[in-house]
Image (tube, helix red, strand yellow):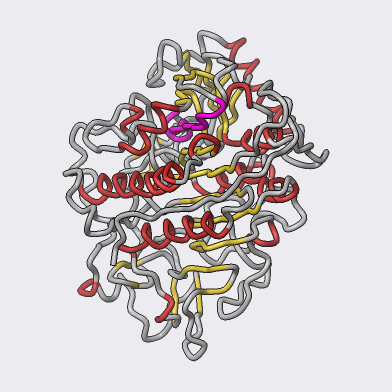
Amino acid sequence: MYKKSIYISFCGIVSFAGVQSGFGKSPEKPNVVVILADDIGYGDLGAYGATQVKTPNVDRLASRGIRFLNAYATAATSTPSRYSLLTGQYAFRKANTGVAAGNAFTIIDPDQETLPRMMQQAGYTTGVVGKWHLGMGDKNGQDWNGYITPGPKQLGFDYSYIMAATADRVPCVYVENQRVVNLDPNDPIEVSYKEPFLGEPTGKNNPDMLKVKPSHGHDMALINGISRIGYMKGGKSALWVDENLADSITLKAVSFIENNKHHPFFLYFGTNDIHVPRVPHSRFVGQTGMGPRGDAIAEFDWSVGQVIQVLEKNGLLENTIIIVTSDNGPVVDDGYQDQAVELLGDHKPWGELRGGKYSAFEAGTRVPFIVHWPKKMKHKDSKALISQVDMYATLATLIGQRLPENAAPDSFNQLKAWTGKDNKGRTYIVEQSGTRSIVKENWKYIIPNNGSSYWSWTNTETGLDSKPQLYDLSKDIKEKNNVAEKYPEKVKELADLLEQVKDNPKTR
């Protein structure tokens, strides 16, 4: 049964030593909740101009916190974006950081410094709930029927309740503290990304069993009436129900907070919404008139609302930092026939930007970014240049934690920008897609690349071109007028800076 409300009870917050932020002496240590949406674009939320879908809970945070207009993920796809957020390092510096398969081995090395480990060292209890997509196990694979290691615990999370990869990839099970939930030992799990298992249905061979049909790929293992990427056998009692994904992970996020209410905590909450396959709970179906994609945005907003509601009820909203952002830009058709294109109407997931998920254009990496902390900030719309890679160093400064020399090599302290005291933010932004690009002041430069100009099944412009691209974003936010030939000195300046970033393993 669905519970209309989930409440969290806090009984106390400890104090901590002052930090170099100008907030006074010995402030209370805030809890930190990072809510990372999946594939939500710059124009998908009411706070960023959406009108066909209502997002009152996100909008409330934006109206009382800092709403950033120039905030970026580091990559236009999930895995490298999440890697950078948790390590403070650009993903292009490390091999095997592309979009991870469901059986990928851990991408973050256990001996690598991480954001959650830093929070642990500062006295926080740390938890990750929801989408992971950063690999588990070692190069020999995973023991899906036992303890899967290395995993989140070895990277600094005290508690984990995760999806190993994405909802469209097997295995379609929850993994709690690195063991599959509700697994019957007499029905062991097998996973393959090479060959199907004899006798197991697939979307390709059993289309009559599908309730959601693929539009491109996604025709392998058939689970809960939806075919996925990859093949899976066994684990029938452990399989998730797609319609209940948001409820399940939101409940676990709340439980983590309830179980740690007597001491400071850091929660990394990766929602499944609005990634494909989009199968929102029945109570959200039809809320937006935009089909499953729009209804999944409403479901995401509900998850955000649970966090707000419980904190407010227990008097903790004032001194809890809530960060709402997305792992990359939007995609409409991403492999399933869910009428996302047909029912889009006047809604613009990318806002006024060009491109989307997978793209080097602005909509690939420019994302919503809201910081809500009423005790230390007032509402403001900020044009400061912000990157998710800076979350590591910024939170370290906030809680008075010194970074080791080898930690967060590309992460800069942006606490003044986060709290509205600095309107400039970063000097430059580095973006990763099928190529790399850089934003500095009003200029955007994209490295030449001979790849396809479109992701065919998504109809998304990749931003790839064999020629250098230079755009003046102050005059051309839609990136329609390539002025590289007109300003060769600016092209050289930005190209040289990108090379310096690539060649220097540490920019911090």
Report the front residue among 339 and 318: 318
- Is 351 positioned to the left or the right of 175 in the image? left
Q: Name the quarter where the C terminus is drawn.
A: top right
Q: Position of residue 439 (x, y in %)?
A: 55, 22
Residue 415 versus residue 392 in the image, above or below: above
Residue 204 versus residue 406 in the image, above or below: below
Q: Position of residue 293 (x, y in %)?
A: 28, 47
- Residue drawn at x 28%, y 67% is 1
Q: Is residue 418 visible from the viewing direction of this image?
A: yes
- Residue drawn at x 48%, y 85% is 184
Residue, far front: 11
Report the front residue among 503 and 324: 324
Q: Position of residue 373 (x, y in %)?
A: 52, 32
Q: Quadrant of residue 204?
A: bottom left
- Is 134 positioned to the left or the right of 149 in the image? left
Q: How many marks?
A: 0
The reply to whether the magenta stretch includes residue 366 is: yes
The reply to whether the magenta stretch includes residue 36 is: no
Q: Quadrant of residue 488?
A: top right
Q: Position of residue 294 (x, y in %)?
A: 26, 44
**Bounds of the magenta segment:** 362-376
- Residue drawn at x 21%, y 39% is 344
Residue, far right: 405
Q: Is residue 132 visible from the viewing direction of this image?
A: no
- Is 232 positioned to the left or the right of 45 in the image? right
